[in-house]
Amino acid sequence: MDNTFICETQNPKEYFDCFMQGLIDRNPGEPEFHQAVAEVSKSIVPFLYENQKYVKGQVLERLSEPDRLLSFRVCWEDDKGNIRTNRGYRVQFNNSIGPYKGGLRFHPTVNQSVLKFLGFEQIFKNSLTGLPIGAGKGGANFDPKGKSDSEIMRFCQSFMTELYRHIGEDVDVPAGDIGVGGREISYMFGMYKRITNRFTGTLTGKGIEYGGSLIREEATGYGLIYFADNVLNHHNEGLQGKRCLVSGAGNVAQFAVEKLIEKGAKVLTLSDSEGFLLVREGITQDVLEEIKKLKSQGKRLKDLSGIGLEFHPGKTPWGVSADYAFPSATQNEIELEDAKVLVESGVKGVFEGANMPSTNEAIEYFLKENILFGPAKAANAGGVAISALEMSQNNIGLSWPREKVDGELQVIMKRIHSTCVKYGEKDGKTCYITGANIGGFVKVADAMLSFGVY
Ligand code: NDP
């Protein structure tokens, strides 16, 4: 059956159903990708019908097909001398407004569906930053947990011996994501530099000594809190003295906690895949520093000991009574049942640090219950925004001071908030999902229409 049909209808709801059916038929076995496209399309389709040039130009259909999808073998030798084989990917989704840009994820759950969902989300997120960056995502089904430093190095170097031919400072600029931090970026950048014999800003998240940007490490977590602060101020509320739940214990979670502490909030939890840490009196900067140290040594939250620190194995933090939640671990960590538990726990605002941490059913429930909801593509855009500023610094050969980059981050998160309000306000209420989706869509869609059909 031809599943590239045109959905000819004047009814937006029918168009959405028809479009989604075609997408599912064309991309079988990719549930995460279907979920991400459905979430965006639901709020965009009515806007398309008000602006028929996008329907006529088949922009949504074109936007949901990646420019290019690369998959490749990555062989490496473990410490026992065994030859191991993993699969690497790069999804170059859309470069209408700038070079492909998005992180690399090393995690056993990585597959084509997960990377397509992440790459698709990245289109809107990167556009929302207001900076000239297209969208991509990549990674491998490699599990860094329990691997030695030498094994990580060999894997990263092998990964780059294929990836290097597809990237470049004006082509595609990868960064980190789950399982890829400063150490991994350094190994990959070193190999890229060696193979190409060029020193360019082709990866971001680099070390400060060789082209990295100050604040990049903090940017996603800090940006999340700046965004939440903007949303709360817009609703005459604030973070001071508020009880907050954070999930995850990695890059995003750690710096979200740091900024929350600075804003006077009381952070009660962190988590990892083994359970959650509860600190009833609130996590202090000292405890956070301990956690950072522990994590940098590859240890687990359960290894942390001290007065007032309770580890709850096999559980999520959502049942702890609180005001706001910041899911910052991974996709679909808040299902409908978790959403109900959060609302029962008194939570009045959810701000997504991770990518797509809430299922579409959970989001529906939050909206029904009038929970303030900051979607990932707006709330966690600070990381990629500062990556773009790292690219700018590399291009002009300068390194900006911490205050300047942090100042830019605050301006960018404020601008993202204003864009969400501009496109998401209706009857005096702001829907941040609609605002982020349409706000991210317009610039990319208009650029695509200008280029004509190809
Ligand atoms: P890290 O690898 O630094 O940390 C991930 C954290 O999430 C770890 O504590 C990990 O626990 C936990 N986690 C991962 N998978 C699961 C799972 N299935 N169940 C429970 N916990 C889990 O990643 P980041 O902090 O960089 O990324 C977190 C999220 O934020 C991801 O969705 C990422 O895409 C998103 N993001 C990250 C950005 C960045 O700049 N880093 C930018 C924008 C979005 P464990 O160690 O036990 O696996």
Image: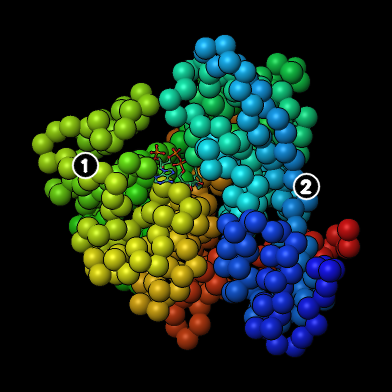
Q: How many marks?
A: 2
In-image side of 197 versus 113 (left or right): right
Question: Which residue appears at 45% of the width and 49% of the height?
Answer: 330
Label 1: which residue? 311
Which type of secondary structure does the marked residue at label 2 adopt?
A: strand
Spot occupied by residue 48 in the image (x, y as percentages of width and height): 70, 77
Spot occupied by residue 350 in the image (x, y as percentages of width and height): 37, 63
| Residue 379 seen | no
Which type of secondary structure does the marked residue at label 1 adopt?
A: strand
135, above or below 75, in the image: below
Q: In this orientation, which residue lies closer to the viewer: 122 or 149?
A: 149
201, above or below 341, in the image: above
48, above or below 420, in the image: below
Quadrant in which the C terminus is drawn:
bottom right
Residue at the right extreme of this rendering: 453
Tags 2 and 1 touching, CB below 8 Å: no
Question: Which residue appears at 18% of the width and 45% of the height?
Answer: 279
Quadrant in which the N terminus is drawn:
bottom right
Spot occupied by residue 3 in the image (x, y as percentages of width and height): 80, 68
Q: Amino acid at mark 2?
A: Arg
Spot occupied by residue 345 in the image (x, y as percentages of width and height): 23, 66
Question: Which residue appears at 50% of the width and 49% of the height?
Answer: 382
Disc 2 packing (10 Å; few <14; some 14–19; many ≥20): few
Label 2: which residue? 68
Q: Amino acid at mark 1?
A: Phe
| Residue 452 seen | yes
Say whether disc 2 or disc 1 marks the residue closer to the N-terminus: 2
Question: Which residue appears at 71% of the width and 51% of the height?
Answer: 93
Quarter assignment of residue 388: top right
Quarter assignment of residue 310: top left
Quarter of image, ligand 1: top left
